[in-house]
Amino acid sequence: MWGLNLPIVLALAAIGGVLAWRRAHTLVWLLYTGGALWAFFRFGFAVPIPQSVVTIYLGITVLALVSYASSSRERLAETVQPIQRLILEPRYRLALAGLLVALPGLAAYNAYADLTMPLEAPGFGREIHPPPPTELTVHDETIDMATAENPYLHYKHDDPELYGKHVENGRRVYYENCFWCHGDGMGGDGMFAHGLNPVPSNFNDVGTLPALQSSFVHWRIAKGGPGMPAGGTPWDSAMPAWEKFLTTEEMWDVNLFIYDFNGYEPRALGQH
Amino acid sequence: MTPQSGKPVSRNKILFGIGVLAFVSVIVTVRLGGFLVDNEYRQPDQLSAPLQTEATAGIVDALEVEEGEDAATAARRIEQALEFADDQGIPEATPRLRGIADEQATDEAEARARPYEEAEYRAVPFVGSRVTVWVLAQLHLLFAAFVLAVPLFAFIIEFVGYVKKEERYNKLAYEFTKLLSVSFSMTATFGAFLTFGLIILYPKFTNYLMHIFSPTFLPYVLLFFLEALFLYSYYYGWGKFGPKMHLFLGFMLNIVGTAIMFIANAWLTFMMSPGKRDDVDGDGVPDFVSAVSESGALLSLRDAFFNFTWMPINIHRIIANVAFGGSIAAAYAAFRYLQAKTDEEKAHFDWMGYVGNFVAIIAFLPLPFAGYYLAAEIYAFSQTLGIQMMGGTFSWLFVIQAALIGNLFLGANYYLWLGMGRMEGGVHFQKFIKWLLIAIALCFAVWATPRYAISSVSEIAAMGGSSHPQLSYLGQMSAKNTAVNILILSTYMSFLLYRRTGRQSVHPHRDLLTRAQAIVFSSAAALVIFYGVYGYFVDSATRIRFAIPQVYSVLAALVVITVIDLPLYRNAAQSGETKWGRMPAVSQYALIFIALSFTWLMGLMGYVRSGLRQEWHVYGVILDTSPDAYTPTLGFATQVVSVTVLIFFGLLGVVFWLSSLGGKKDWEPKPVADGRDQLEGGQAA
């Protein structure tokens, strides 16, 4: 349920319930919270959380627990009282000796685990969108990426009939060339999509087309994978450079069509 | 100033200083002596036979061109050696030596014939030009931010003292102002250092900026002069002028300081966005109007000055400066608190630390909105810059930023919770801390969750991509905006609890008003969460607009709750007195931690803003063709930021020490048993 590993979550909740019922000491609660959150982040999700994120979360957890324990003189005194008793009272000497062995043992195990970790190639974090160039030259025509817009977009209001013709042409171009990867419904799930890593863009996603100016989409269509910027590599994009196969008008038309099909507007210049 | 209570500078410290000076003097003397012996040319009157042989060897040595020696100097030196050899009749000094001398003379002639060429760039060994200018600019900026911020809240505190007729506010404002004098000198020193750094290392580009902004430099210098005048008259005139006149000086100091910053902001924002946005063709779509031609020639100084990102930077910097200045002043108070020996001193610096932190947090609360406005304007100016910043390489730095801001919120709340210990009867509100902490930690975690996590290959395979199926929702704007708004509300709640600790309202409608506050608070939180969740179900343009009602609901809640709270707790019954100075040492380290986090954050985000231009000096106009025209790795950038912060704190230690000297006792000779005074060094007077 919700991508959670339910047995783990329920077990942790049950332990918490027992501690609440037994009115556990503050120190026990702090230790439980730290341990339970570690177990939750590490094993509580059906799809494991990456270690880098677990580290961030555990860092926040430790900060929060230390802040809580020391947020007043009284609470600090209450929290450290069992530790003081453990160290000072003779009846706990055995437990203390066990702790003195266990702590370095834990550190040693940690060092052992780090050294015997299976070697693995590092992964590459994908960026959301690659940064486009400031200028774009397609078929000897240079456009300013900051200000350029789809030249046929204004027909939507000025001449709907002509706009429709451009959209239709875009539809033809799309279903002749693009749908193999981007899919019939533009969900990034075309018949070739499963063989590609990264998967093709999903144009239905509200975070993709509406967040981009049409000049950005034009750049991606015209230059494809080979035109990706030098920074942030490797892109591993399988997108061809369509300027080698399509005319400029066809590329702007398919640009128009994918927005029209999904009911989105390109991000306007200067729009936040 | 009159001598004040406190300890005189200890003899050990003076001895240590003298020891260091002596050590440095010995090193310098030995090095200087060695240099003179090596380089000084002494012509003996007459040489004996064995000395003549020695001189021959010396001359042959002298004919070797030394490393780093320029051609003209070497030629002159060799010519003198040859003349000496001729005078002394030394036979080895003839054909070979003359050949070398001719070669040197040819080199010199070539050097003279070579036309003057203006250097585009010059290099700095080991660290490089960029890092040099980067560190200098950052240090200048940190001190400048402090110097601009402190007068702002010193003036406000003095004004409050004037209105409330309470002397303690006046004293506190003066304590803050004490830090200004040395910091002002530091700002000017690093400003000069930076200017020379730019002229020497980036001469062509600096010349270009001079060409664009030449009319602004003279007003800048004049304003700087005026700032010095107002600052020193404000500081040295404390208690010498009437309160209104003194407040006027403080007011003018702030006006002039802000004007200086606005001018300097035009220079740096021009480099990022050299033009303005205007609907030129009247089609309702904003067009970009460049302030310079394609070759970089100035078209409009007005557009270059009032450029696209100028006002967002002005707003962001004013607010950030106050937050930063407050935190540094609080760190100074913490430093003095930890040194304090008497209860009186502890009480004073505890209060100062509290006020400094209060100023920092109050200014910090609207800062995320100002930052959001700046980022939105950058995005609106150029999608390339926007994508580079939020979705490209620089986006990882925003994860670090989130961690730092989370730490700041946590640190600020922690300090307030500890502050409840100052009051008698503070235990009552302790039970709420747990829930506030949970809210803050949850929001902190949401804010620090990256949309695309750093993952290993097996982790990517398990997730089916770089984003986690559940956690990636927390990496989106809706979640982030919700988290920051709830963080602000929680921090404000901590402040309210702190304010109420040990106090009991005597207002006739106190239950009604308290319930009204709770309703406003819960409504704002509910609205923020509603828009945060709803944002996942709408398109991005609509989602982005949801940020506005979220912000307004939080701001409105803060205002309404404050307006209710003021009468509610006016003349409130106190269950015990506030015991200033009753704070554990850890609270003072929390203040220093907050100051450190602010400084690091400024350095980091300053790098992001400046580094965004990548290979451009002036974005889209003047290309950076120096060897440093590449984006450094994130690790290297954070190391430079860290080193800069360390240098800044080292210098700040000097500022704190110098500022605290005023409170030390004047030096006096020690009385001895026989009634005579004895100098500290043991010498009888």
Image (tube, coloured by chain):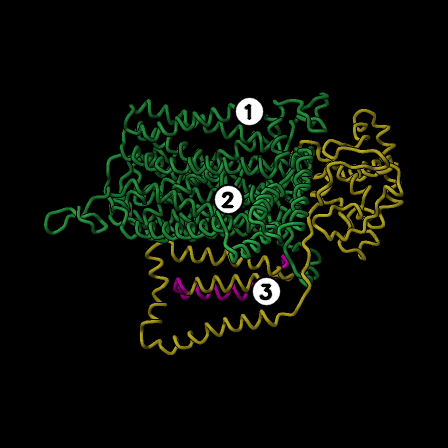
Chain colours: A yellow, B green
Q: CA distance from mark 3 to mark 2?
A: 28 Å
**Is B448 covered by the magenta stretch?**
no
Mark 1: secondary structure:
helix
Residue at point 52%, 23% (across, down): B218
Q: CA distance from mark 3 to mark 1?
A: 61 Å
Mark nearer the viewer, 2 or 1: 1
Q: Which residue is mark 1?
A: B216
Q: Which residue is mark 3?
A: A43
Q: Are marks 2 and 1 on the same chain?
A: yes
Kind of residue at disc 3? Phe
Residue at point 61%, 49% (across, down): B65
The magenta span reads: A1-27
Query: Can residue B537 be seen?
Result: no
User: For this rendering, which residue is in front, B181 or A106?
Assistant: B181
Q: Is residue A157 above or below residue A181?
A: above
The quadrant in which the N terminus of chain B is found is top left
Q: Position of residue B204 (x, y in %)?
A: 64, 34
Q: Position of residue A25 (x, y in %)?
A: 38, 64
